[in-house]
Each structure stands twice: as C-alpha cells, then as structure tokens.
Image (cartoon, grey):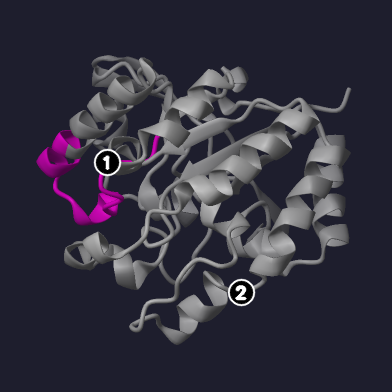
Amino acid sequence: MTPVNYFTVDFEEWFHGLTSASRRPESWSRYERRAAVGGEWLLSALERAGVKATFFIVGLVARETPGIVRAIADAGHEIGLHGHTHKLVREMAREGFAADLDEGIAALKEATGTAPAGFRAPCFSVDATTPWLWEELAARGVKYDSSVFPIRAMLYGYPGGGREPFVKQTPHGPIHEFPMTVYRAGGVNLPFSGGFYLRALPYALTRTLIQRLNAQGTPVIIYCHPWEFDPGHPVPEYVTVRERLSHYGFLQDARDKYLRLLDDFAFAPLGRAL
C-alpha cells in the first residue's frame, strides 16, 4: 500500500525567509506584509485538491496578519509553530528559546483558538548544540517536532540527526521527531522535497524520488513557504548573491510544481503520522 505523504508549510513573511533580512529586525517595519498573497493562493490550491496540511506559523505573522491565520485554521488545517520571531534556535540560549516559544504559542492561541500541535525551527536551525529543544517543547504540550534536516548545507543541517522518525523521551513525556525527507544515494543524504530544492529540480525527478521512497514504504514530507507563491515580493537592497538564487530563484515555476504534486500524490497533515 502506498503511504500517505505529508504536506507542510513554513508560514512566514518573505523577509523572514531572507537570512540577510531576518538578522535585521529593525528594518522589518518598512516592509509590506505579504504572507496573505501566497497564503490565499495556497489555501485555494489545497481546497481544490481536498488536502489538509500542517501550517507551521510564525507567531509575529499571527499577530500582524491574523486574518489569513484564522482562515488557515477555519479551513481545517493543522496548526504548528515556526517560532515567534523567526530567530534561529541554535543562536538562542535555552532561556531565550523558551521565552520565544511562549510568545509564539500565545500568539497562535489568540489568532486561532488552538495551541500548536507541532513545531519546526526557523531554517531547520537545530543540531547537536540544542539538545534541550525537545524538553522545552514537551513541557508546553507540543506533541511533535520536525526540525531535523539530516544534511550538511551552508546555513543549516544536522547530518547526525537521523533520517528516520524517532521518539525523544523527556521529563515532561515523549515527543516525536519527524526529520525532513532526504534521498540516500552514494552514501549521501540528498535534499529534494521542498523550498529551493523542489523549485530548482525538474519535476519529473522530484516525482520519481517520491515514488521510489513510497515504494519502499517511506512517506515524504513536503515543505514550502507562502512567498514561493508570490513571485512579485520585494527585493531589499542588501540581498546577497546567494539569496538571489536560493530565495528568488525559480519562483515562477513554484505554483505549477506544487499543483502537480497535489494532483499526483496523496497528502495529510504531519500530525497524522502520530
């Protein structure tokens, strides 16, 4: 039996997705809030496909544009947290992470009436230096995490984090970890299932890799961001050469590729894996 795959959304503003801009919060007040642009398109696409997804939402987005966040909840999608300020977890002390977590949970409860079921670290920013992540999440009733990305990339990655789901025992009870999907080839973990990787790769290759993993009984976790469906979002003056490729590259193809995914495969919210 072909497994159901999981559709997830890192619901953030376009400037949160830029490493250069995310480190300049003093500049955020100048930027147009556009999460609803890509968000509304994505909600429509998911509704047409009959798919419920998991939206990992930044707390500040819930505070600043609560209408689109309420629309996500009202459509029956699963609510998760993507941090409150989109700060990288590995750059915060444990106390700072705990405070950010509390603010984000409060923001989501206020906007949706729902506590987050799961968590995903901004930019997958967990590694061996953040072993306290799971304990802090479990202490707040979060049931699962999906922050481990078992690759070695320029800005993120936890190569030793494991490819298979696992349960982390904490003093506050167990919490499930669902690492991001990779394709193992030649002894190397290859990313393909979302973001720049999915936009840049030929769709036929993405489809083949999902089919191969599904044939092995492995469900695939797909991830995307609302700004990927908003190719007209601004380009700040300080954007780096890398960001022009990793963030702005292949945006024109994103809508078509994700629509084809929704047509070709069955999806569910990540919490269904519990």
Front residue of this view, candidates 19 and 180: 19
Q: Amino acid at mark 2?
A: Gly
Report the residue marked by disc 2: 249
Residues rendered magenta in the picture: 81-99
Alpha carbon separation for disc pair 2 and 1: 27 Å
Q: Which of the two labelled residues, at mark 2 and mark 1, occupies the earlier sequence position?
A: 1
Image-quadrant location for residue 105: top left
Picture layout, residue 202 above or below residue 121:
below
Is residue 5 visible to us here? no
Residue 89 drawn at (x, y percent): 27, 49
Question: Residue drawn at (26%, 66%), measured in percent from left and top?
Answer: 30
Q: Amino acid at mark 1?
A: His
Left or right: where 104 falls relative to 4: left
- Name the quarter where the C terminus is drawn: top right
Image-quadrant location for residue 52: top right
Which label is found at residue 134?
none
Find out whether residue 96 is within the magenta segment: yes
Report the residue marked by disc 1: 84
Q: Residue furthest left?
A: 95
Question: Residue drawn at (86%, 28%), measured in percent from left and top?
Answer: 2
Find out whether residue 186 is within the magenta segment: no
Question: Residue drawn at (76%, 25%), measured in percent from left and top?
Answer: 50
Residue 49 drawn at (x, y percent): 79, 31
